[in-house]
Image (cartoon, rainbow, N blue to C red):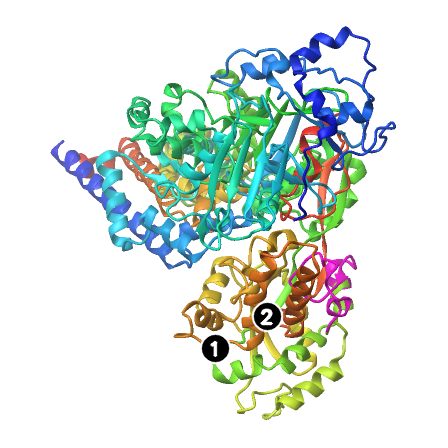
Amino acid sequence: MINREVLMTRISKTLTLSGLALGLLSTVAYANCPAATVNDMMGVAEGAYPHQYELAEFQTLADCTLEFAENPAIADLNAMIRGNPDLPPLAERLPEEPLVIAPYDSIGSYGGTLDALSNANEAGTSDFLSIRHVNLVRYSDDLQTIVPNIAKSWSWNDDYTELTFNLRRGHKWSDGQPFTAEDVKFWYDNLALDPKINEKPKDYVTVAGEPMQVEVVDPQTVVFKLPAPKPGLLAHFATHYGQGFQPKHFLGQFHPEINPDADALAQGMGFADGYDAIMAYYGNSDWTDTGTPMLNSPDRLSDLPADAMPTLESHFVIRETTEGRHFVANPYFHMVDTAGNQLPYINEMDELFANDQEVRLLKLVNGEADYKSQSLQLSDAPLLLENQEKGDYTIQLKPKIAMHTASFNVTHEDEAKRAVFGDLRFRKAMSIAINRDDLNQVAYFGEGQIQQYTGFSPAPEFVDPQWLTYATEYDPDGAKALLDEIGLVDADGDGFRDLPNGDPLVLNLQFATQGIAGQVVELFGQYWSEVGINSAVKEVTPDEYRSAQSSNQLDVGLWEKGQPVGIILGNNELWVAPFENYFGHRSALLWAEWMESGGTNGVEPPDYVKQLAEDINAFQSTPSGTDEFKAIGARLVENMTSNLLFIGTALTPDPIYHRNALKNVPEFKTASYEYYRTYPYRGPQWYLEE
Amino acid sequence: MSQFIQFVMTRAFLALVTLLTVSLIVFTLMELVPGTCAERYLAFKNTQGSQITIADIAAEERRLGLDRPFIERWGKWVGNVFFRGEFGDSCILRLDINQLLADKFWISLGICMAALILSYMIAVPVGIVAASSNNAVANNSLRFVSYLGLALPNFLLALIIMLFSTVFFGDSLTGLFSKEYRDAAWSWAKFGDFLSRAWLPIFILGWSATAFALQTVRALMLDEIGKLYVTAAAARGVTGSRLLWRYPARHALGPVINSLGFDLNRIFNELPIVALILTLTEAGALLFESLARSNDQQLAGAIIFLLTASIVLLNFVTDIMLALLDPRVRRGMMG
């Protein structure tokens, strides 16, 4: 990412004013700060980053002193957090340098309960989770600019091997304890790298398979030292659920390397040992929705110091069962609005689990939830749109990142099929046999944007436009000519083409609705039969599909696919055979075997596949935006697209639902997981108008 | 009396064998489905953005002991259930099953029993009267309502009622509790709230059960009413409801009591679908989830085990009831 040196010396002179001092100064004749919003900045200039300011930056630009105000119910909400001490005054709860947020439309009002709808514990919860989510940094709603959040600022060294984060002085956990650089180091050294917690470190905490080093310079400065350049590390923190910090003062008390009496302490509370207690609170995963002791240890809850571990998020979980969860506002949250009101605006959040799509739709139509995006699909859009006015909600149809794709098994077990599927002319024939306009009208209500699969989605500027439409034209005659050329002709006169050796060719189109819509697969079958390729469509469960894929039994891979450049910078899976992870759209498994075994097993892949693997590593370690970066990116796209290993269809939208009473909800750019769902749209400044 | 003890012992032994067999069948069937629970669990994680590798799945399987042969896993599970009363942890929910099912199974059983009682409270008197009545209009309308109850799938009935309620009352009638009682401890207020919601599944399950029981009672009564001993009793001057209740009804009800366990099973079989649609968070919905979606052998095994145990127990109770009602059975049992 772009090297952003954000320490602004011109404003540092005001940093010494503590929040408390500001409170005392409130009677002094300073001009009141303008309640600037994104829609009406009231003359306040844009700061270093869109829609948000550091406190001193804002006060300089607006020429005022911000007075802070708190939620009148905050003491009551704090009382609902078991184990939290009584609240100190607001000035002691906010960091000395709070993050000032310009709300989208208006300064909100405190109160209300946001109702959310998820599938089950840890299932279909990420759209709700991302409302309260925080991380060191965040993508702004343009999905291009990385902006500060928990970190006040950051800087890279010249060769992208040292990433320094500056934290906020006086920032506190939800239990009032200080948050410092030690919490970052604790997360990395004692959780992420501890084999008793993670058997093997996750890919995202290593660089080229090697661990980093996290060094604490002072309580507000922490440095990640990388064994190799990885400019994508910053984007990783902006998009990933894994928060780069955990409460050392809380989890550390159970960690034998931090507290020598950890095991005794944990045993006194009914756990087997300290690690057992950490498991109960942390779930041994950075996934922030793992069950709390309220769920996994209800019988020993009364002996525990807290129902859940402290957080820096906007809301804190106070109840959790298999029916749902309940959250209250974090009294120590680090954001204020441009009028000085501490965020979040919304007092409480209530999440209900309903593991049936039709029931969830009924509840949404009925206005029983305030916001929903995960698991809503384009096929639900007509029903949701039809009832918008009656249910007093709004549906936004926004493009997804991934699109439906088909891949031919170029390393099929059957040599005759492998030869045909491995022939680029065949793959091209299959791509131009698809009538994408018709597909768009029938399966996507005409809402799709026809596109070839290029690997990057949405397409960055370095993608040559010719690849976006490559082999997407509908040309059945051209397809037939190509098939004739390969020698796929109808030998037995049944109306369908047979393999060159005379055996019949029937594509087995197995699919699971989790990966692709059934209608799309049926249309594929129809288009291909029109150029003489016979197929049989069969719906299976996702497990059966994965199992067939893993054992190389598929003729055709059918699953959605696509990642944005921000993810690709930190993750090479789309570019190295089998071109995705276990749960994604894999192909060419025998090429993958060859590459993993260093050439002893499997089938040797063509040169362009080796080139892709080489290029993606170079791409990830080249600073983005440079000419070299763009050149490598363009080569990746060319090799991926021109070889049609994955045949694209159209980028389609998915619905995003919010009730009209939920305010400050902007237009989303995408309906997708990739930028961590709601995180760019700043849930803490949402409010409910009753 | 010794014969009675022998009878109880035999039934208890058979019940045990049934329980073991059922749990073995459940484990075996679930073994045949591709994808272990570890994989399903990580698949959920993957939809949430976690990058998962095959090595992660293998590690998770090791952690959960899923890499052991399934007979061994079943043996260990059965041992824990019988000797320690512990069902273990649910693989998908990461929870202690005993804690998870504590309320939920009783709620499910309560709903099913309520539906069962409701159906018999209606079916027995109405069935008996219907069999002796010559009123064509009443008989035909009764038949219509019964056939509707039998023919209308429960899930459809649930959906119709939900849709109706949503359109006209703005309440989708889903869930077991209102929001304010959902996480609260049990109290009379919570129980009242529960009843205000539970009537719907009870009604839905009860309708088809009533229809079924009604037809059974009516057919059995019609069989008995024409028999000679009834005519003889009538000739001796016994008339009206006294005749019906003392003679044909007593014989007709024997087979009905015998089928109580069977009926409970049938109602419980229908519960998961209804529960899923009404988003009732009780054991029926959990059973569906664990069988169909998450392949959670421990959880599915535990629920089916509890259900089988309830049915076996109910059958045992009905056997005793039958012995009390029917002297022929009593003599056969007690000597």
- Asked if residue B73 shows in the view, the reply is yes
Q: Quick one: label 1, few (<14), some, or many (20+) residues within 10 Å?
A: some
- Report whether mark 2 lies on the same chain as mark 1: yes
Point out the tag, 2 or 1, that comes first from the N-terminus: 2
In the orientation shown, which residue stands out farthest toward the right? A43
Is A548 placed above or below B303 here?
below
Q: Which residues are magenta?
A: A441-470
Q: Quadrant of the C terminus of chain A?
A: top right
In the orientation shown, which residue stands out farthest toward the left? B2
Q: Nearer the viewer, residue A11 or A621?
A: A11
Q: Kindly identify the amino acid type of the residue bearing the numbered disc 1.
A: Glu
> Could you say which quadrant of the image residue B320 lies in?
top left
Q: Residue at x 69, y 34 (%)?
A: A682
Q: Nearer the viewer, residue B102 or A292?
A: A292
Quick one: SS at disc 2? strand
Task: Judge from the rendering whether residue A440 lies leftward or rightward of residue B38; answer left or right.
Answer: right
Q: Could you tell me residue A99's position as x and y percent?
A: 68, 27
Q: Nearer the viewer, residue A159 or A111?
A: A159
Is A242 placed above or below A580 here?
above
Q: Could you tell me residue A519's position as x and y percent?
A: 66, 63
- Asked if residue B154 shows in the view, the reply is no
Q: Check disc 1 and report the residue beneath it.
A: A604
Query: How many numbered marks, from 0 up?
Result: 2
Q: Which mark is residue B209?
A: none
Q: Kindly identify the amino acid type of the residue bearing the numbered disc 2.
A: Ser
Q: Check disc 2 and report the residue beneath it.
A: A407
Q: Chain of mark 2?
A: A
Q: Residue at x 56, y 90 (%)?
A: A500
Kindly report the secondary structure that dominates the magenta region of the rendered protein. loop
Q: Nearer the viewer, mark 2 or mark 1?
A: 1
Task: Judge from the rendering whether residue B311 lies leftward or rightward of residue A366; answer left or right.
Answer: left
Quick one: SS at disc 1? loop
